[in-house]
Amino acid sequence: MRALILVGGYGTRLRPLTLSCPKPLVEFCNKPMIIHQIEALKVAGCTEVVLAINYQPEVMMGFIQEWQEKLGVKIVCSQEKEPMGTAGPLALARETLDDGKGTPFFVLNSDVICDYPLKDMLDFHKARGAEATILVTKVDDPTKYGVVVMDEYGQVQRFVEKPKEFVGDKINAGIYVCSPTILNRIELRPTSIEREVFPHVAADNRLYAYTLNGYWMDVGQPKDYLKGLHLYLDSMAIRQSPQLAKGPGINGNVLVDPSAKIGEGCLIGPDVSISAGCVIGNGVRLSHCVVMRGVRIKDHSKVESCIVGWDSTVGAWSRLENHCVLGEDVTVKDELYLNGAIVLPHKEIKESVSTPAIIL
Ligand code: GDD
Ligand code: MG
């Protein structure tokens, strides 16, 4: 089976992290977001994954070389000359997606995390004879998503992208199973699957919705990314994953890469991920935060509800809180207080930031 992951888009809502690499390569729980998806696709029987990209192809190519071998899945790029939206990339990759035998394929938005019930979705799709099956989940605020209205068999009656008025609270989770016939509806031009394809498939009674039983989050913006961290680690705890850290100083769900070094007398958690090569000093307090590859946090600092980007350094006796996001290779000097600071890559911070601000 094949799959296409929509990797394009500039990821502006996840800046400054996306100034260093495309959104799908931003680490989530110690590996690039997209790796969580490719691993799930492999388990569901996919042998070939198409990455639909529209910018930074060279970064993507390097990534593909490394991970193809590690994962044992063929990964190919389908590069757009101009952004093709969420449906155009399917037309561009038509040759790969349509095997001529009617085999369905998966389509994924690259910024969603969940338990990926791909096999169950596929069985549901086949049983219903659907042209497309959408994974749906319930959210409190449906306005920033695509809303799906369906009957008790899962047949979709309406699909409304980013509704201005309340239509329902079941939303498109950004994961689809499609039969190749859907390709006949998609022209080779920039076009939206949500606005220009799904409403027509629904009108033909060929669009179905499979309801997700479990956690889900679009991690394409910092606050949601941190919520996603909580949900992901919580699901690891429910599965009693041996990867979660244990021992003195660990509080709640914490993920620590084996190559990270943690000093004496730290208090870490709940909801913390610490990636490869990080060095955490003595007496450090971390909670609700993501510490990316190669980060150094010096003695007695406290980091709460923040994202610390690759290779950054947080000085001793510093305090970071309230959704600070440090881009790649940021240095925060000793004894500073950062409140909601968004810091661009390669900056050196020498003064406290007491109210939320973007540091250019
Ligand atoms: N290749 C390519 N080319 N990919 C693109 C392009 C493009 O021109 N534009 C967007 N994408 C990719 C993004 O990288 C992302 O993986 C996916 O398409 C969806 O784009 P987002 O920008 O993240 O959309 P959204 O979050 O506002 O809404 C979408 O996701 C929601 C669930 O998170 C829609 O699919 C909604 O219906 C859905 O509810
Ligand atoms: Mg999104």
Image (cartoon, rainbow, N blue to C red):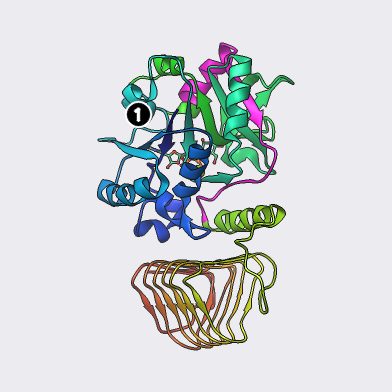
Left or right of 181 in this view: 52:
left
Q: Is residue 44 above or below residue 250?
A: above
**Residue 240: horizontal and vertical position, in percent?**
69, 56
**Residue 107: horizontal and vertical position, in percent?**
47, 32
Q: Amino acid at mark 1?
A: Pro
Q: In this orientation, does residue 158 appear? A: no
Q: Secondary structure at mark 1?
A: loop
Q: Is residue 78 above or below residue 269?
A: above
Left or right of 299 in this view: 345:
left
**Residue 26: horizontal and vertical position, in percent?**
43, 56
Left or right of 145 in this view: 67:
left
Specify the quadrant that holds the C terminus. bottom left
Residue 239 part of the magenta segment: no
Q: In this orientation, does residue 44 appear? A: yes
Mark 1 Cβ and ligand 1 under 8 Å apart = yes
Q: Is residue 334 above or below residue 156?
A: below
Residue range (magenta): 195-221
Residue 207 part of the magenta segment: yes
Residue under the point 43% across and 29% down:
192
**Residue that numbered label 1 is attached to:** 190
Frontmost residue, 113 versus 323? 113
Figure quadrant of residue 228: bottom right
The outermost residue toward the top is: 204
**Residue 4: horizontal and vertical position, in percent?**
42, 33
Specify the quadrant that holds the N terminus. top left
